[in-house]
Every structure is written in structure tokens, then in C-alpha cells.
Image (tube, rainbow, N blue to C red):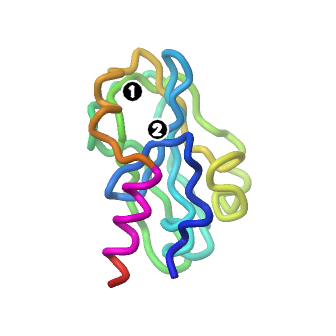
Amino acid sequence: MTDAQNIPENLRYTKDHEWVRLEGDTATVGITDHAQKALGEITYVELPPVGKVVKPSDELAAVESSKAASDVYAPIGGTVSETNGMLEEAPETINASPYEDGWICKLYEISAGDADSLMTAEKYRTLLEQEEA
């Protein structure tokens, strides 16, 4: 059984299990419910510096858990405009709320065309089903 029930339709996804919410010229980035479940209890998040410029697939942040450490890659190009400081005190917020309170950072000056290469919720569900097969 996939995590298909917790894949919001309004987001775009990467094969590395990051999500992006596009709102005008801003993109909010985080890791998916599937990714946080695979990592287990998240114990530390290394946030990117504000002002960092990234291209798609660049390392953006790092997430550590009781099981593993994992890099978070930029799903879209842009400049880090804000980070979720709550994660420094409560990294487990990603486990509890990966799509709302557990966002990692926001990008501005985004390359909107980059979103065209990201997966819709339907395609991401298919990817998870293939990974489980």
C-alpha cells in the first residue's frame, strides 16, 4: 500500500521525494510524507543560508534522523529567501506535518519553467507504487 492518501494534489514532486508549492514567484520546498516515514524520527535539519542560489538538483539542505542522514535537493532553481527556523528547535515537525508546518525553505527569483519537469501528484503516486513493486 502506498502513501497515496497523503500526496497533496496542489504540489509538484521530485523522484528524490522533495515537494514544491508554487505561489506566484515563490516556491516553498520540503520533503514528502513518504520521505519522512522512510527516515524515521527526524532529529536535526541543516537549513540553507538565506541568499543561497540553487539550480535544480543542487544540494539545498540536509535532514538527519535516528536511521540516516539525507540530503534535500532543490526541486526548482531560485534564491533562498526564508528558512523554517522552527525546525532548528523542533526538527520532528517534519514528521508531524511534512506539507504544512514542516516546510524547509522558500525560494524566490524562481525559474518557473523548472516546474514543468516535476511530477504531478498522480505521477508521484505511480513512482511510489513502482518503488514498492
Residue 38's place in the image compared with 63, above or below, is below
Q: How many marks?
A: 2
Disc 2 marks which residue? 48
The amino acid type, in three-letter code, at marker 1 is Lys
* Image x and y of residue 87, in percent: 66, 49
Q: Which mark is residue 33?
A: none
Please state the horizontal and vertical placement of residue 114, each as a whole percent of the image.
Answer: 29, 30
Point 60% across, 44% down: residue: 103
Name the residue that disc number 1 marks. 52
Position of the C terminus, as image quadrant, is bottom left
Position of 63 with respect to 127 (left or right) is right
Residues 123 and 109: in front is 123
Badge 2: few (under 14), some or many (20 or more) residues near its Cα, within 10 Å? some
Magenta segment main secondary structure? helix
Q: Residue 85 versus residue 56: which sits nearer the camera?
A: 56
> In the rendering, at what x and y percent does residue 3 appear?
55, 71
How far is disc 2 from disc 1 in space, using C-alphas?
A: 7 Å
Q: Start and end of the magenta stretch?
A: 121-130
**Image vertical order of residue 125 relative to residue 1, above or below:** above
Within-10-Å neighbours for mark 1: few <14, some 14–19, many 20+: few
Tell whether 83 sits left or right of 72: right
Badge 2 vs badge 1, beta-carbon distance below 8 Å: yes
Name which residue lies at 58% across and 27% down: 82
